[in-house]
C-alpha cells in the first residue's frame, strides 16, 4: 500500500466480541479433535458457530474418530472469555447450546486424502518493517488496546469493564512513515455503575480512568500522540448492553482484524474452525511466513505474497511476490527463491509449520499474525538468510 501522505486506519475487537466468541468456539472444537483423534492427519474439521441472545449453535462438517463433548466445550470457552455474570447479558451456565455438526462430503475427501488442497481460492501474506512484529502499525496498536482492556478487566484494574469491546486507530503518514496518531476510538462494555445521573453516558471520572489505564498505557511510548489527537471513548455515551445480548455473532466475520487491518489485500477466506488441509488457513499462514522472512532479511521494507490453489490439486496454481517498490532483490528473484526453498503443497505446509497440533484457539482472538507465541511457527524468521537481504544491504552501503 502506498502510504506517502495518508490517514490509515485499522480496528480490533476483544475476545468477548460476539464474532470472536464464535471464532474461539470453532477453534476450540478443532483443537479438541486434533488433541483426541489418534489419526489426526485424517481428521477433517469445518466448524461454524452462531451466537445470539441466550443461545449458541455449533454446526459444520467434521470427520473424526474422536468423541467431542461440544456442549461442555462451548460452556468452558464462554466462561474463560468472561461471560460469567448475568449483568453482561450472557452467561455460560444458563445459555442454550445446540449441536448441529455433520460429516464432511466424500466428494471433497477424495481429493484431500491424496494430498490436494481442501478448496480453491487465493491466500495473502504480508509484512512490513513499521513495527518489531513486522506488522502494520495501526493494526498492532489496535490489537494492543483491546489486549489491555482484557488485562484491565481480568486483573480488576477497572472492575466495571465487560468482555465486549472494540478499538480503532488512525495514523497519519508523511513521506511513507508514521507521523502522528490522528484518532483513537475505544468502545468497551461496562456495568451501569459508572453511568452519570442522566443514565445516558459514563461519568467523566470513568472516561478519564479508561483513557489513562488503557489508551495512555498503550500509546504513550509511541511518541505519536499530540495535542490534536482525537480520543473517542464509548462515543454513543454508554455500552452497558453488549455481547450476544446486543449483537449476533458468527465464525469468520472478522477477517481483516485477523490479518493485516486493511493495509494488505485479503484472499477472502476465513480461518477459524478449519483444519489445516483447508488452504484458506494453512496457505495464509505460509504466505505470512514467507513475507515476514523476506522483510526480516532486509530484502524489502514491505512484502505481499499471494498463493492460489485448485481444489484437490497439491501444487499452487498461482504465486506472486510484490515488494511495492521497496525491494533490494527483484520480485522475480524472490519468487524463484520461494519456489526452490518452500514446499507449498498442503502436506508440505502442514509439515513445515507443524500444523496438526491443537494450537488454534490461541489464534482466534487478537490476530493470527504479529504475536510471537512459540506454537505460531509462521511467525519465525528462521528462513531469512535464504533471501540474502543482509548481504544486499551491506553491498548498498559499500561495505
Image (spheres, helix red, strand yellow):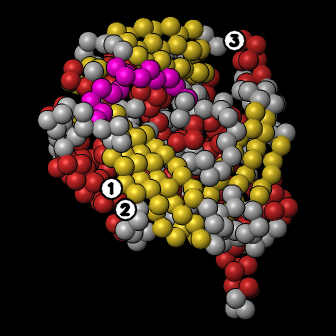
Residue 98 spot, x, y in % from top left: 42, 8
* Residue at which label 2 appears: 219
Q: Is residue 103 left or right of residue 299?
A: left
Q: Residues within 10 Å of mark 1 (few under 14, many from 20)?
A: many
Q: Are marks 2 and 1 in contact (CB under 8 Å)?
A: yes
Residue 210 spot, x, y in % from top left: 25, 50
* Residue at which label 1 appears: 215
Q: Which residues are magenta?
A: 238-252
Q: Is residue 289 left or right of residue 367?
A: right
Residue 325 spot, x, y in % from top left: 77, 67
Q: Is residue 193 above or below residue 79?
A: below
Task: Tell me the number on the disc at residue 105.
Answer: 3
Mark 3–mark 2 distance (CA, rounded to whole Å): 48 Å
Q: Is residue 27 left or right of residue 157?
A: right
Q: Please tell me whether mark 3 or mark 1 is closer to you in this view.
A: 1
Question: In the image shown, does 52 or 347 lie closer to the viewer?
Answer: 52
Q: Is residue 353 visible?
A: no
Report helix, strand or loop for mark 3.
loop
Which picture quadrant has residue 199? top left
Q: Residue 240 magenta-drawn?
A: yes
Residue at 30%, 26% (x, y): give it.
Answer: 241
Residue 206 spot, x, y in % from top left: 19, 46
Query: Mark 3 or mark 1, which has the lower sequence index?
Result: 3
Mark 2–mark 1 distance (CA, rounded to whole Å): 6 Å
Q: Main secondary structure of the magenta part?
A: loop
Q: Is residue 54 visible?
A: yes
Q: Quadrant of the C terminus?
A: bottom right
The residue furthest bottom is: 398
Residue at 64%, 13% (x, y): give it.
Answer: 104
Q: Please tell me whether mark 3 or mark 2 is closer to you in this view.
A: 2
Amino acid at each position: 500500500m502506498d502510504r506517502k501522505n495518508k490517514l490509515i486506519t485499522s480496528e480490533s475487537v476483544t475476545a468477548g466480541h460476539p464474532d470472536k466468541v464464535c471464532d474461539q468456539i470453532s477453534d476450540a472444537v478443532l483443537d479438541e479433535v486434533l488433541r483426541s483423534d489418534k489419526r489426526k492427519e485424517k481428521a477433517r474439521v469445518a466448524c461454524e458457530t452462531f451466537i445470539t441472545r441466550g443461545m449458541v449453535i455449533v454446526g459444520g462438517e467434521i470427520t473424526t474418530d474422536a468423541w467431542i463433548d461440544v456442549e461442555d466445550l462451548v460452556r468452558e470457552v464462554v466462561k474463560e472469555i468472561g461471560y460469567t455474570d448475568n449483568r453482561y447479558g450472557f452467561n455460560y451456565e444458563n445459555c442454550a447450546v445446540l449441536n448441529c455438526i455433520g460429516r464432511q462430503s466424500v466428494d471433497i475427501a477424495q481429493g484431500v486424502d491424496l494430498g490436494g488442497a481442501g478448496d480453491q481460492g487465493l491466500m495473502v501474506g504480508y509484512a512490513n518493517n513499521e513495527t518489531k512484529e513486522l506488522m502494520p502499525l495501526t493494526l498492532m496498536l489496535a490489537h494492543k488496546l483491546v489486549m489491555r482492556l482484557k488485562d484491565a478487566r481480568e486483573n480488576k484494574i477497572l472492575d466495571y469493564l465487560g468482555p465486549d469491546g472494540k478499538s480503532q486507530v488512525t495514523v497519519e503518514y508523511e513521506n511513507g512513515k508514521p507521523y502522528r496518531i490522528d484518532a483513537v476510538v475505544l468502545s468497551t462494555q461496562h456495568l451501569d455503575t459508572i453511568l452519570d445521573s442522566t443514565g445516558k453516558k459514563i461519568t467523566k471520572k470513568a472516561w478519564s480512568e479508561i483513557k489513562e489505564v488503557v489508551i495512555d498505557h498503550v500509546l504513550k511510548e509511541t511518541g505519536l500522540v499530540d495535542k490534536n489527537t482525537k480520543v473517542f471513548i464509548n462515543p454513543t455515551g454508554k455500552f452497558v448492553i453488549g455481547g450476544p445480548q446486543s449483537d449476533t455473532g458468527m465464525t469468520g466475520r472478522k477477517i481483516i482484524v485477523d490479518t493485516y487491518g486493511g493495509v494488505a489485500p485479503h484472499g477472502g477466506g476465513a480461518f477459524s474452525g478449519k483444519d489445516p488441509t483447508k488452504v484458506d488457513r494453512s496457505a495464509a499462514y505460509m504466505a505470512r511466513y514467507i513475507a515476514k522472512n523476506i522483510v526480516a532479511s532486509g530484502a524489502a521494507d514491505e512484502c505481499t505474497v499471494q498463493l492460489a490453489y485448485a481444489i484437490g490439486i497439491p501444487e499452487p496454481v498461482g504465486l506472486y511476490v510484490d515488494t511495492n517498490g521497496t525491494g533490494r532483490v527483484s520480485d522475480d528473484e524472490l519468487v524463484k527463491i520461494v519456489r526452490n526453498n518452500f514446499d507449498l503443497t498442503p502436506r508440505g505446509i502442514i509439515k513445515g509449520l507443524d500444523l496438526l497440533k491443537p494450537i488454534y484457539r490461541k489464534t482466534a482472538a487478537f490476530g493470527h499474525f504479529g504475536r510471537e507465541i512459540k506454537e505460531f511457527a509462521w511467525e519465525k524468521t528462521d528462513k531469512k538468510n535464504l533471501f540474502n537481504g543482509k548481504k544486499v544491504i551491506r553491498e548498498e552501503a559499500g561495505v
